[in-house]
Amino acid sequence: MSKSTNSSNASAPWAYSEKVKEHFLEPKNFLMGDEKQFDFNAKGTVGNKICGDEMTMYLKIEQGRVVDVRWKTYGCASAIASTSALSEMVKGKTLDQALKITPEQIADYLDGLPERKFHCSVLGSEALAQAVEEYRAPKK
Amino acid sequence: MSRLFLDYNAGALDPGGLGNPNGLHEESRHADILISRARDQVANLVGADPSEIFFFPSASLVNYFLITSFARVHTSPFEHPSVIKSISEFDSKNPTLVSCMLANNETGEIYNIEHFFSKFPNAKKHSDVSQAVGKIPVNLTAIADKTGLDFATISAQKIGGGKGSAALYIRGGKAGLKATTALKYRLFALGTPNAEAIRNFGAAADRAAKNIKKFKQHIRPMRDNLRARIQAEIPNIIMNTPAGATTELCSLPNTLDVSFPGAEGESIMLMLDAAGIATSTGSACATMDGKPSHVLMAMHKNEPTERAAEIAHGSIRFSFPPNAPPDTVDRIMNVLPNIIANLRAISTEVK
């Protein structure tokens, strides 16, 4: 359904790219309901309800590598799509590689975000950084 | 023999053959007659004398011209941005102009403008009635007699008259305008009247009278049914459109604004859009200035800021046209409960 552009249903182009639309309407790796359903060992939350965006990244880290990931997001279409995209990008990466993912790369992965929505992708990488930081902190 | 048109410098003829309404030849007179008829039609719709109707290119411009003609202005917190952003000095103690809309564009709430105006006997009084006209009966002469109203804003676009026309009502017509020097001397900047757009405004005003009946008989029960079904089928919601024993007097018949805390408005709106249903939201995520709806924030100002923001961010406005199909509510309720449940389930706030 997400990629269909059949002419009988021709609609005005979204302000968002097809890729954003796809990740918004069919998000990947989200965590539905209680977080206990996912076996994670790192978690980071950023944003706040006053701004209208809040997201949490849950990571399962094994031997310095992100082996699985889930997320929860309260926010607009681009916030949901950004977190979904980031969850795809981060899977399988080492922590150092994961930390190098920039907001620009998340936006690029989504074929761009409207300028005023760019902060949504910033929030995603901040949530990820916080999760990694939290994971590393007790070991120091 | 066809006429020779040699007044091209006054303005090329419109595609419909209309000339500059300010000229004296037949092409101009034709345009002027159309404008004059439209003035009668609009005046008839809003219960004013035709001499009290002044055409503008847009309702926002009406508000801008009027508000900026007064030094100190006080308004309700619920006004349209074209009112609020035109004010250079807010003054709630000794304003020269007070402004209170008749009905709110977001919530559909109908305000008691008489009560609002009564606290400012020395100020001129303005009401943006553009959301009320065509949805409920509006009689500006009666309102003016009762409340002291001096000015009102009327929009063509909101009653199906297309873009490019609106009207400023000035009580007493030219005499009323004379008393407002700053406004009077700026009207020249409006330029040549858009005869085509004004004609469409007039025609829409005639149709609007029939629509008022449709809104009352068909749309209001539909809206009330949507309210009841959302209340029954979706948990934890907040109705931003007031209801009461006298619903007809407290909100527009076609508007229902609801908040779904835990789900964000732009996401709800775009999910509905993907399901073929067009709505709007007061969420910051969907506005150009990145702030949640000032109307909903003001309405819920007694709540903690975080709660008020969540209510505004989670709001959806359903505003029915007069010809909404009979299965409208079923179609909304076939998809809305799932959309809200899914967005809440992936939200950071665990329900």
Image (cartoon, helix red, strand yellow):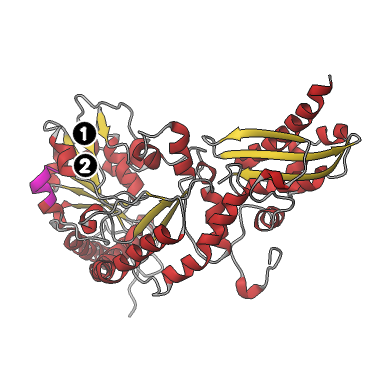
The magenta region covers B143-150
Do the dots labelled 2 and 1 sit on one chain?
yes
| Front-lying residue, B90 or B226 | B226
Check disc 2 and report its element: helix, strand or loop: strand
Q: Is residue B218 left or right of residue A41?
A: left
Q: Position of residue B216 (x, y in %)?
A: 25, 67
Mark 1 crowdedness (10 Å alpha carbons): few <14, some 14-19, many ≥20: many
Whether residues under marks 2 and 1 lie with C-beta atoms below 8 angstroms apart, the answer is yes
- Chain ID, mark 2: B
Give me the C-alpha separation between circle 2 and circle 1.
Answer: 7 Å
Q: In the image, is B149 to the left or to the right of B101?
A: left
Task: Please state the chain letter of the residue tagged with numbered disc 1 in the rendered image.
Answer: B
Against B131, residue B196 (above or below) is: below
Q: Who's the residue at 35% across and 66% down the image?
A: B225
Q: Point out the tag, 2 or 1, that comes first from the N-terminus.
A: 1
Q: Which label belongs to residue B334?
A: none
Q: Which residue is mark 1?
A: B97
